[in-house]
Image (cartoon, rainbow, N blue to C red):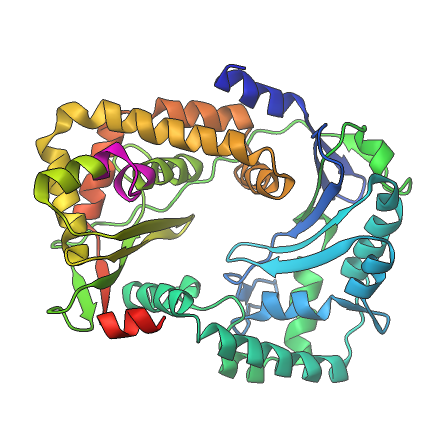
């Protein structure tokens, strides 16, 4: 099947409806799947620390969204995980920077029992001070354990160096002082604001049944209302007059290097989805050991780089690129790579084709796994686009777009952490 046709087929399998209460249903048929994946996504994540109301704004402690996620596993004195397990379904939950998710896999004939249980728990929670105290101890332990994960620790440390006031610099569970500060009043206010049907999307992925066949009958479905897609953009920030760089660790021993870069809109482009996909393509070109670009640059400059990976995180209020490299020349890689691109512009089209094919193939490959397919469906939902829209954006990227990203790499604010070889081996 032609790759573009595959994306069109994903759109044909997608059915978006709304219930009369405003709950959005995102159905993606997936004929080969034996199980059904159900995920309820709430538009409330770790970045949401300010509640706005006519009576005034309420500032919430960091970690509020994640704390609510923990509390809502308890409903009427029972643990939801146990209730779902009794129905042959496995329930999990996670909080990201932008949203909170409750996800489970189930046999299709169990959904009419499990979906009502989950929605009832999300919409009708009763707060219990004893349970709040219990979860404070659980989450404090979770935060302490996360600090032992060096990868996580460097990630948030780099963002804190770049943008200390950003909620993105704080682990989604919050800090220990935030958990101590949380009280029942904060939690109730956040819950009442966030856990409303109109702020939720229920994803149903798998099988070929019609949407109505999988949902409980009391959820009356309506067709998607006519609306104009909301174009999400990333804020434009002025580049620093000179590239700013903050360094921790010993620059004389640079075998293991973590680099954070502040990224945002580029000239002529501030669409959030477009920038996410462009940075994904650029990362596959620049920061994958098996990419043609890396093979060329390694042979040309005899670079000793043994490990290379990158993650781009893009949001409406800005973004960050986190790069990890190991080897004797790990610290110099970004500068060398940026210079090489400017000297070999005739090669950009070939590099771009590799990056585009790599991302396109990844989406097609991921579609064989319901959990990964959900992530792309969630991206479509978040950016109010179709799968075919994503395909067009990917294959519409041109050489000038790539050069704009390279310019952004060269001029962006940077934070660097050098880890000694002894410490790196210990990890």
- Magenta span of residues: 284-294
Nearest to the observer: residue 315 or residue 260: 260
The reply, left or right, for residue 57 in relation to residue 206 is left
Q: In which quarter of the image is residue 404?
A: top left
Q: Quadrant of the C terminus?
A: bottom left
Q: Quadrant of the N terminus?
A: top right
Q: Determine the residue positioned at 52% across, 38% down.
A: 383
Q: Determine the residue positioned at 44% across, 37% down.
A: 273
The reply, left or right, for residue 19 in relation to residue 344 is right
Q: Residue 212: where, in percent of width, then height?
A: 84, 33
Q: Residue 59: where, in percent of width, then height?
A: 53, 71
Location of residue 387 with respect to 255 vertically, above or below? above
Location of residue 304 with respect to 33 vertically, above or below? below
Q: Determine the residue positioned at 26% across, 41% down.
A: 286
Location of residue 379 with respect to 346 vertically, above or below? below
Q: Is residue 195 visible?
A: no
The reply, left or right, for residue 374 in relation to residue 47 is right
Q: Check if residue 285 falls in the magenta segment.
A: yes
Nearest to the observer: residue 393 or residue 144: 144
Q: Check if residue 91 falls in the magenta segment.
A: no
């Amino acid at each position: 099947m032609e790759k573009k046709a595959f994306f069109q087929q994903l759109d044909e399998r997608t059915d978006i409806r709304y219930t009369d209460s405003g709950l959005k249903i995102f159905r993606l048929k997936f004929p080969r799947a034996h199980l059904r994946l159900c995920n309820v996504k709430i538009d409330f994540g770790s970045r949401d620390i300010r509640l706005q109301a006519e009576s005034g704004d309420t500032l919430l402690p960091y970690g509020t969204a994640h704390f609510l996620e923990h509390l809502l596993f308890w409903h009427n004195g029972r643990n939801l995980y146990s209730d779902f397990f009794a129905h042959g379904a496995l329930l999990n939950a996670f909080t990201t920077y932008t949203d909170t998710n409750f996800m489970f896999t189930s046999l299709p004939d169990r959904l009419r029992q499990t979906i009502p249980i989950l929605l009832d728990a999300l919409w009708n929670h009763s707060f219990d001070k004893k349970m709040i105290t219990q979860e404070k101890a659980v989450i404090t332990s979770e935060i302490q354990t996360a600090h032992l994960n060096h990868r996580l620790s460097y990630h948030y440390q780099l963002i804190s160096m770049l943008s200390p006031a950003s909620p993105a610099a704080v682990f989604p569970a919050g800090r220990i002082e935030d958990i101590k500060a949380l009280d029942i009043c904060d939690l109730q206010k956040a819950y009442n604001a966030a856990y409303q049907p109109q702020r939720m999307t229920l994803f149903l992925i798998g099988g070929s049944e019609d949407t109505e066949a999988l949902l409980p009958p009391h959820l009356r479905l309506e067709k998607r209302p006519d609306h104009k897609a909301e174009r999400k953009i990333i804020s434009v920030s002025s580049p620093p007059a000179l590239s700013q760089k903050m360094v921790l660790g010993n620059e004389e021993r640079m075998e293991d290097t973590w680099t954070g870069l502040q990224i945002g809109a580029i000239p002529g482009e501030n669409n959030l989805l477009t920038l996410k996909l462009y940075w994904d393509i650029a990362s596959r070109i620049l920061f994958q050991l098996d990419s043609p670009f890396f093979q060329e640059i390694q042979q040309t400059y005899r670079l000793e780089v043994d490990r290379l990976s990158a993650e781009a995180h893009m949001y409406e209020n800005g973004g960050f690129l986190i790069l990890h490299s190991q080897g004797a020349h790990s610290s110099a890689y970004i500068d060398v790579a940026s210079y090489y691109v400017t000297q070999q512009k005739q090669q950009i089209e070939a590099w771009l084709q590799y990056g585009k094919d790599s991302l396109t193939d990844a989406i097609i490959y991921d579609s064989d796994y319901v959990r990964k397919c959900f992530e792309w469906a969630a991206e479509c939902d978040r950016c109010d686009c179709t799968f075919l829209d994503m395909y067009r954006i990917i294959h519409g990227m041109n050489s000038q777009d790539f050069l704009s990203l390279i310019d952004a790499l060269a001029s962006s604010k940077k934070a660097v952490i050098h880890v000694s070889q002894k410490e790196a081996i210990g990890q």
